[in-house]
Amino acid sequence: MSKTLTGRTALVTGGSRGIGAGIARELAREGANVAITYRKSREQAEEVVADLVALGVKALAVQADQSVPHEASTAVEQAAEFLGGQIDVLVNSAGVAVMGTVDQLDLELLEGVQQMMATNVMGTVVTTHAASRFLSDGGRVVLIGSIVAHRVPVPGVAEYAASKAAIDQLGRGWARDFGPRGITVNVIQPGATDTDMNPADGPNAAPQVAMTPLGRMGTTEDIAKAVVFLAGENASYITGARLTVDGGLSI
């Protein structure tokens, strides 16, 4: 079977772990050269890069704190240079989560919420702005949101949900902004997904599975395959859309 993204270039923020790493690997399987960003774990990032290279593509990891504008924009420039001066697919996956009901947020947690907003929202804005001059006409932008942007099933996630609701609206607005260049912008909204932050064998897994019609948590590959679809030619007339990948949890 032919690879759908052979010769294309991709930048995946937050690509050293979890959903971002799964996306990077799937893009590479489809033939794309991939750059990833990471905030702390150089070892994890280098492991992902080794996996990508083993798949026969070029790969690079760039350290950047998504919440710091100059770091986020510099990382995009470094990635674009490595990828030959052009980014065909931008996947904004980097994000953090801070949980707690609003009446229980102490000063430390409130500072965490501020960091979360800076990472999830402003970091996405800065990265996409920086990438805009490298994005190829007809390219793809995929934002990783969450089903909690529209459905808040448990207490303590309001602020995180607000950050993901912002991502949803950025996707709609940017679809207008980039439309004249033939660049599509879409949002993927994962549900309960098995990652190191939310493991399938963790204490919170059982109630999430119980709410999911398909009876299991999602995998990073489930999310990554949706990204590959939106990055490919079969999605060329889809923009400003919200693709929910949650096993039916949000119905």
Image: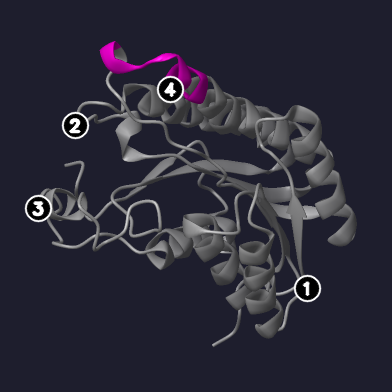
* Amino acid carrying mark 2 in the image: Val
Please check the rendered image and state whether residue 173 is part of the magenta-colored stretch, yes or no: no
Q: As rendered, which of 169 and 154 lies closer to the eye?
A: 154
Location of mark 2 (residue)? 154
Q: Which mark is residue 109?
A: 4
Residue 66, placed above or below residue 209: above
Give the overall secondary structure of the magenta segment. Answer: helix
* Discs 4, 2 touching: Cβ within 8 Å: no
- Compare marks 4 and 2 and give the one earlier in the sequence: 4
| Residue 107 inside the magenta-drawn segment | yes
Q: Amino acid at mark 4?
A: Leu
How is the rendered protein coloured? one colour
Residue at the image position 59 percent from the left and 77 percent from the top: 29
Q: Residue furthest top?
A: 103
The image quadrant of residue 151 is top left
Locate residue 116 relative to residue 53 in the image: left or right: left
